[in-house]
Amino acid sequence: MSTVTRTDDIITGTGRVDATMEAMERLSLVLWRERELLDELHYKLEVEQLVLASGRSRWLAAAARDIDALLATIRQTDVLRAVASDEAAAATGMSSNPSLAALAEAADEPWSTILAEHRAAFVAATAEISALADSNRHLISAGYRSARETLLSMGESTDGYTAEGAATAEPLRNRLVDRSL
């Protein structure tokens, strides 16, 4: 006969704690936290995009710092997810470092559906975040080109553009002017 040491232990017919259930619950909680962080990253990327689109660079450094801090938190949570995934894999008899799709296939219901829904949400969030980050990169490079062209027009002449759209310039030359005319 086994002794229950915590009130939240789940006892199976054999008298053991159901490690699979506990591991899956832990994994699901970490996945929810990661989804929340990805939603927050999406928001912060949209804020950065609005700052970039407005042409006001005052808050751009603060927006970039916020994103960097959030990415550090996501990396830490990713480590927790890897540990929880390994525990869930061990509880289901899988080898370590499984994909979320593989875990969803190996898990019993309701965990199979729950993990598949988490995976679908991650795929959608990743696509949205990637598109937004690409758009922000485009805005940043367009702003850089614009600032460079402005600086070039102050001291040097713009001769043309490269295939990437960057301005090319010749250095200033001394010019002779006949003022007698």
Image: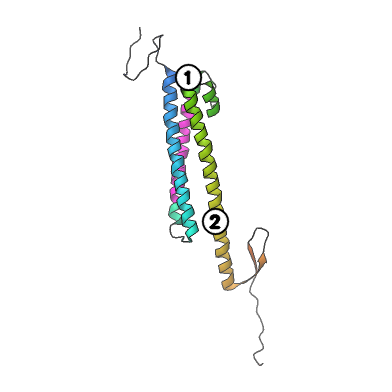
**Of label 1 and label 2, which has the lower sequence position?**
1
Residue 116 coordinates in the image, percent (x, y)? 51, 28
The correct choice, above or below, for 91 with respect to 52 in the image is above
Quarter in which the N terminus is drawn: top left
For the residue carrying disc 2, how many other residues have a C-alpha within 10 Å: few (<14), some (14-19), or many (20+)?
A: some
Lateral position of residue 149 relative to residue 115, left or right? right
Can residue 59 be seen here?
A: yes
The mark found on residue 139 in the picture is 2
Query: Which residue lies at the image location 57% right of the left edge and 54% below the top edge?
Result: 138
**Tag 1, which secondary structure?**
helix
Distance, label 1 to label 2, CA atoms, is 47 Å
Q: In this view of the protein, which residue sits in the foreground, 43 or 99? A: 43
The correct choice, above or below, for 57 with respect to 158 in the image is above
Residue 57 coordinates in the image, percent (x, y)? 46, 60
Query: Which residue lies at the image location 49% right of the left edge and 25% below the top edge?
Result: 113
Magenta span of residues: 65-87
Query: Which residue lies at the image location 45% right of the left edge and 41% below the top edge?
Result: 39
Mark 1 belongs to which amino acid? Answer: Ala
The correct choice, above or below, for 63 with respect to 181 in the image is above
The correct choice, above or below, for 13 with respect to 42 in the image is above
For the residue carrying disc 1, how many other residues have a C-alpha within 10 Å: few (<14), some (14-19), or many (20+)?
A: some
Q: Mark 1 or mark 2: which is in front? A: 2
Answer with the quarter of the image where residue 176 lies: bottom right
Lateral position of residue 120 relative to residue 16, left or right? right
What residue does disc 1 label? 91
Mark 2 belongs to which amino acid? Answer: Leu
Quarter in which the C terminus is drawn: bottom right
The mark found on residue 4 in the picture is none
**Is residue 146 found inside the magenta-colored segment of the image?**
no
Can residue 99 be seen here?
A: no
